[in-house]
Image: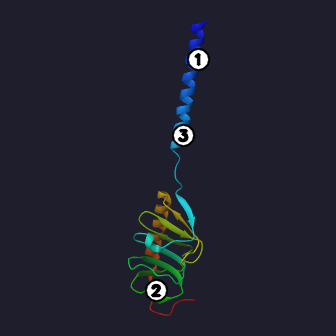
Amino acid sequence: MDVIGFIVGFILGVIVVALAIELGMRRSHTQQPTSRPTHTWSIDEIQNPRIIAESLGAIKLPKNARVVVNRYQDKDVLKGIEVKEHPGIRGNYIVGDDRALILSGALAPNALGVWTIEKSMLEKLNGYFEDSWCKASHMDNDEPEA
């Protein structure tokens, strides 16, 4: 009788320890979120910014930025920056080497947006930027559009 109790206890102990290890391993492998909302951001946080702007507000752009824009308020903001116009642009985002900021409205200071570091999203946004850049035309030196 003691031998049977010992064997049953041993087997139950092994099962409980195996379950505890399994549950412990699951908790330690939780992933950090790849996206988060923000309303406080700076374009300086993005390395090598590539910008798609359906509507470009009054924002100071870095000199190393490449911009594809549909509408803009102040053409002086775009001086000294690689800029092309594309009337088919829809949406506003800034994509960099390791992150992107997708904005809910015009590209303007402290606009509501979502940061993402998700690799597949960065690849898609970069692809959309490069496609738009190729199809866009160089800016005229005429008056800004309204």
> Dot 3, crowdedness within 10 Å: few (<14), some or many (≥20)?
few
Q: What residue type is labelled 3?
A: Arg
Q: Which amino acid does label 1 sit on?
A: Gly
Badge 3 element: helix
Residue ID for mark 2: 77
**Disc number for residue 9:** 1
Q: Position of residue 29 (x, y in %)?
A: 51, 44
Residue at 40% x, 71% y: name it.
Answer: 48
Q: In this view, does 39 lie above or below 32?
A: below
Residue ID for mark 3: 26
Closer to the camera: disc 1 or disc 2?
Answer: 1
Badge 1 element: helix
Residue at 50% x, 81% y: name it.
Answer: 59
Q: Are marks 2 and 3 in contact (CB under 8 Å)?
A: no
> Viewer-proximal residue, 59 or 28?
28
Instruction: Count numbered badges in the picture.
Output: 3
Residue at 54% x, 23% y: name it.
Answer: 14
Q: Quadrant of residue 63?
A: bottom left
> Dot 2, crowdedness within 10 Å: few (<14), some or many (≥20)?
some
> Viewer-proximal residue, 88 or 82?
82
Q: Are marks 3 and 1 in contact (CB under 8 Å)?
A: no
Q: In which quarter of the image is residue 112?
A: bottom right
Q: Where is residue 60 in the image (x, y as percent from the top left)?
A: 46, 82
Task: Report, in whole angstroms, how far the alpha carbon at label 2 lies from the one at label 3.
Answer: 50 Å
The N terminus - image quarter: top right
Q: Where is residue 80 in the image (x, y as percent from the top left)?
A: 39, 85
Q: Is residue 62 above or below residue 117?
A: below
Sequence-first tag of 3 and 1:
1
> Dot 1, crowdedness within 10 Å: few (<14), some or many (≥20)?
few
Q: Which amino acid does label 2 sit on?
A: Val
Q: Where is residue 74 in the image (x, y as percent from the top left)?
A: 51, 88
